[in-house]
Amino acid sequence: MSRSYERIRGSVESLFRADTLKATVFRGGAWLGAGSFIEQSFRFGRNMLLTRLLAPEAFGTMAIVMSATTLIQVMAEVGAREALIQNPKGSEESHLRAAWWMSFGRALSIYAFIYILAPYFSRFYANGELTGLARVATLSVVFDGAISPRAIAAVKEMKYSKWAVVANGGGIIGVLTTIVLSFFMRDVWALAIGFCSENAARCILSFFVCPWRPRFLPNLVALRDLLQFSKGLFGLAFFNLIFTRADIFILGKMYSPGELGLYSMSVYLIQTPVVFLTSILAQTLLPAFSRIQDDHPRLNRILLRVTSGSVMVGLPALVFIGFSGHSLLTLIYGQRYSIGAPALVLAAWAALFGILNAQITVMFYAKGLPQLHRRSVVLMAVLVAVLTYPFTKMFGLWGPQLACLIAVVAGYLLQVERIRKVTGLSLSEYWKSFSLPVLTSIAVAAAWFAARSTGVLAQPVANILFGICGCLAAYGFVGAIIFRDSRETA
């Protein structure tokens, strides 16, 4: 026990005190993880409260507003922040100024466009309230575009504590604002104003934490340099939106706002931890991969480790959600939201493959080749666009998530094949990382079936507690095997 403790202590100290890239990433991950965990905990609590204060129609209406405004937003995507992080000169004043003008100019154009189109959008969905909601909610785009570029440069320089204060601090302020407003407004306007306040808070915090003064004109040489990267992003955001938002567009026409609200909140339950994980991975991996973008063996080793860790955490959790989804929605949101359990389960599976897919995408971005991701996004968008409507007609509210799952698996497999050609990744080593998590997840599923046959899992609380214990047992088993292998290797 003493030797094991000293070994663990030494490993932790080497991770958090050394000056290596690995240690820097772990320290950054700790900052981002803590900040994101606190923010997502606030969001989780907010949703539990709001589903009891507001009618499902409010969430359905807000889902339509966000989907339609996001459509316009992504059509003008320029990738200024990704370009700043990836570019070796991203910390220089000339590039900071160019990136800010790219982001802010885009934001102003988007808001003007949405302001004009809002009445037509309102007529399409036969809801007059959508005009004002769209104009207020989209102000968040302007605030987001005006964020200090020094805050983005902090991510490039792996000063994650500053970015955590800006991103997560602003999110928490917005969540608290929404909660306070919901007690007074009790309608969708509390959601719209609260959403706008998140990016407003981030913008203000960014200039306090990472001071920077905008100058009147951008540096044209730096602007052209950043636009070289942005060319590879052309079309990606639009097709990605089709993939992620086609369900809301279609369900908004086929179902009432109340039914859409039940669906969107059920799916959002899985998006909370997914946003937490994806945000940490993207913000830590992109700067790390950018530093070693030409070292393919090292890139592949990191990808294998991150993929293995994601699958080890994700698969047992998917088994838990598959067996306890109905109980989770009943306990967290209320009985009427349990109708979304099938959509929740399918969304969870799609989320895991989406996380694995995002890790490969970050490698493309780090190498300055975002265009390599385009074929995958186009494939996913086409599949979702083709399958969502007929699947909704056949299967109801969970049909769109089935279409999403099929699309994301197809896009993920395409990305795996593409990264093999780019970095020489060994597919046998890649798929081998799935073996142990799959076996432990099967064991968790078998235990759940055995317990269910006894009738002890009939109550939601008992069902959820058993699922949590099963996940913890699986994680402990995998962790013990990893620790044993590391000792034998040493």
Image: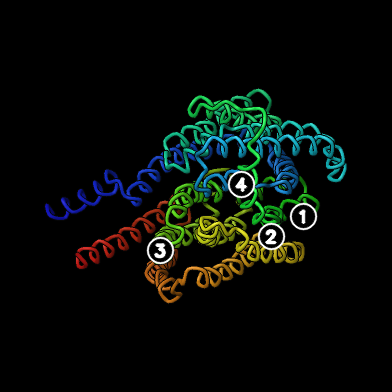
Crowding near pointer 2: few (<14 within 10 Å), some, many (20+)? many
For disc 1, the marked residue is 250
For disc 4, the marked residue is 226
Crowding near pointer 3: few (<14 within 10 Å), some, many (20+)? many
The Cα atoms of the two marked residues, 4 and 2, are separated by 37 Å
Residue 148, image x and y in percent? 56, 32
- Residue at 64% across, 57% down: 232
Secondary structure category for the residue under label 2: helix
The Cα atoms of the two marked residues, 3 and 1, are separated by 36 Å
The Cα atoms of the two marked residues, 2 and 3, are separated by 28 Å
The Cα atoms of the two marked residues, 4 and 3, are separated by 33 Å
- Residue at 86% across, 37% down: 119
**Residue lying farthest to the bottom in this orientation:** 428
**Residue lying farthest to the top in this orientation:** 184
Q: Return the disc, 2 or 1, that comes first in the chain's sequence.
A: 1
Residue 117 location, quadrant: top right
Residue 207, image x and y in percent? 54, 26
Q: Are marks 2 and 1 in contact (CB under 8 Å)?
A: yes
Crowding near pointer 1: few (<14 within 10 Å), some, many (20+)? some
- Residue type at mark 1 is Ile
Crowding near pointer 4: few (<14 within 10 Å), some, many (20+)? many
Which mark is drawn over residue 339? none
- Residue type at mark 3 is Ser
Colour scheme of the picture:
rainbow
Front one among 201 and 183: 201
- For the N terminus, give its image quadrant: bottom left
Is 458 on the left or on the right of 266, as rendered?
left
The Cα atoms of the two marked residues, 2 and 1, are separated by 9 Å
Which mark is drawn over residue 400? 2
For disc 3, the marked residue is 308
